[in-house]
Amino acid sequence: MELKATTLGKRMAQHPYDRVELLNAGVKVSGDRHEYLIPFNQLTEIHCRRGLVWGELEFVLPEDKVVRLHGTEWAETQRFHRHLQARWQQWSDEMSTIAADLLQQQLAVIARHTAEGKWLTRQAIASLRQNILGALEGLPIPTRRLDTFANCRELWRQCQAWLQDMDASRLQHNQAFTETMLAQYAAFFAHIESSPLNPAQARSVVNGERSLLVLAGAGSGKTSVLVARAGWLMTRGEAAAEQILLLAFGRKAAQEMDERIRERLNTDAISAQTFHALALHIIRQGSKKVPTISRLENDTAARQTLLIKSWQQQCQEKKAQAKGWRQWLEEEMGWQVPEGDYWRNETLQKRLAGRLDRWVGLMRMHGGSQAEMIAAAPDEVRERFGKRVKLMAPLLKAWKTALKDENAVDFSGLIHQAVNVLEKGRFVSPWKHILVDEFQDISPQRAALLAALRQQNSQTTLFAVGDDWQAIYRFSGAKLSLTTAFNHYFGEGDLCALDTTYRFNGRIGEIANRFIQQNPHQLNKPLNSLTAGDKKAVTLLTDNQLDALLDKLSGYARPNERILILARYHHLKPAALEKAATRWPHLLIDFMTIHASKGQQADYVIVLGLQQGQDAFPAPARESIMEQALLPQEEDFPDAEERRLLYVALTRARQRVWLLYNKEEPSVFVEALAELGVPTLRKP
């Protein structure tokens, strides 16, 4: 059947289309030069209108595109429209049955996923959404017409509602799943630790996301949650013991975790590893040549002696090296360098040894050639960094020579080798679940090892616990953004927070939390205490009151109550402690640096050295060019890492903290703490 414009109508309309032909399942609109084929499955509406003399047909397509035919005789137009409408409606009714079946199938898929009694992960829901959208592309009629069919209308609205509120639906399902699990496994959560897990801890344990970071403040039970997670996976049958990889950042932490697992899970099948032990295991399994770890890695004194001797040799034998090092130490570091053969000065050697050790470590951690290191440095320091690299090159060579003589590797080389083995497919990971403690200390190198493990199996989960407020190891390569931007680096997942601390009282918690959150880059998380604490739980005291304070403590501190004295630097250990064994024989006193106190706790904490000037706390923000080029750039907030260091010091205490400051040159932190309501006392 065909409809044509009249001769006069065609001339008056001056339109590219002047005839329409009805096809099997569509229409063809054409003119002398143009032709448009419209299948019924692209047609959303047909309008028939009468002008002053002639008729008009309007075909509406998706996205409100319109094709019109003008200048047809009105009676013929009406007759053609009635016939076309009947054919189109008949075809539409047939297609609506197919569409209804397809929609019903997609709703059944959604129902099946939500009724499985499993956690709906973001990855699973995104995949499900993609599959449903792909299936809907197979609809035989445009989606805007589905509301016009009684058999499709409600089904389509249900599909739309789910697609539009997908995240809300996922959260609702997972909330219901969590409540069911907490009720069904109430006995597990009551007995997995010495005291029952609190709701926030239990919800973290049952969370089923592929990537999950549990943000846990000081004393909030990070390790408890990690051990409970391992127990949960085995209790639910989601993993056998050999499919769980537990990672810690040091041998002591790994040993403590093993003890917790044996005590709480009654098994030796799960053993915590350090990242270096993991790397060694991967290399042993995937390479014919098994590396030996250099003895220098575990002998700081020998390592620093090697570097100092190499440095002395370079300065002694090469005038250019001696001149370059003098310029570096005086102009950049601001040190007073003796005249003449300054490299023989023992005081300077002791001061420089730790720096050389750190700089060589950072260069080894980078792993690239010297040219690659220089190219990767920030523009503003690249030229100066290039000069420093040339001065450091002989020391790096000496380090590599020592490793070669031992036929050994260092820790950085170990992880590089392990990543290489994984990328070449020489090691197949047996682990379905990776659990990491103290995640805020992770470096890009360790993160690359995790990524290489997970690439082998897209279903491998990463469960990490950490606290960005306690990230104090940037100097060793830890990158804070790996924690604060967790989802960006490790895939879309969840962030959970543990909201209760079992260590310190509410007053210590209030001051510590408010102090650290003055930095807007720190993640905001609640941390409540079980006990209130009085206003003097945190106090400021002048640094000449240490003896008086220990005298007072000797009057009421019990023999089993630990007193922890902390300082920014080890050489600030107070002389008063030399007489402690006789003057305060019943006090249990320990001294350590704040960095070393990570993971420690005590009833009473005394923080020394809140001062400016020499050995300042906070330490000056000025860094060596080596740190600026090789370390992750710190967030743009004054003394950000030093603030976290003081937070760590504050949160070691259960009952009270005293902050001893220099009255003549007080630290900037003294004023900040006073503004938070910390009282200043003249005497203890």
Image: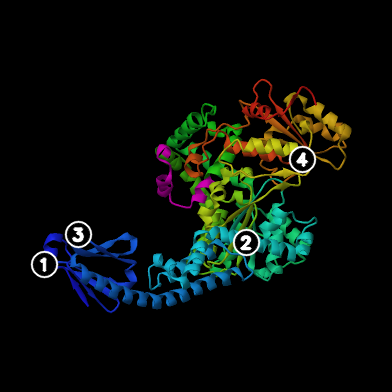
Range of residues picked out in magenta: 360-381
71 in relation to 505, above or below: below
Which amino acid type is shown beneath numbered disc 2?
Answer: Asn
**Closer to the camera in the image, 172 or 154:** 154
**Residue indicated by mark 4:** 505
Which amino acid type is shown beneath numbered disc 1?
Answer: Thr
Which amino acid type is shown beneath numbered disc 4?
Answer: Asn
Q: Farthest top residue?
A: 664
Left or right of residue 266: residue 168: left
N-terminal label among 2 and 3: 3
**Residue indicated by mark 2:** 174
Image location of residue 670, percent across then percent down: 66, 27
Q: Secondary structure at mark 1?
A: helix
Q: Is residue 207 visible?
A: no
Which amino acid type is shown beneath numbered disc 3?
Answer: Leu
Alpha carbon distance from label 4 to label 1: 95 Å
**Residue indicated by mark 3:** 52
642 in relation to 499, above or below: above
Nearer mark to the viewer, of 4 and 3: 3
N-terminal label among 1 and 2: 1
* Quadrant of image for the N terminus: bottom left
**Which circle marks residue 7 in the picture?**
1
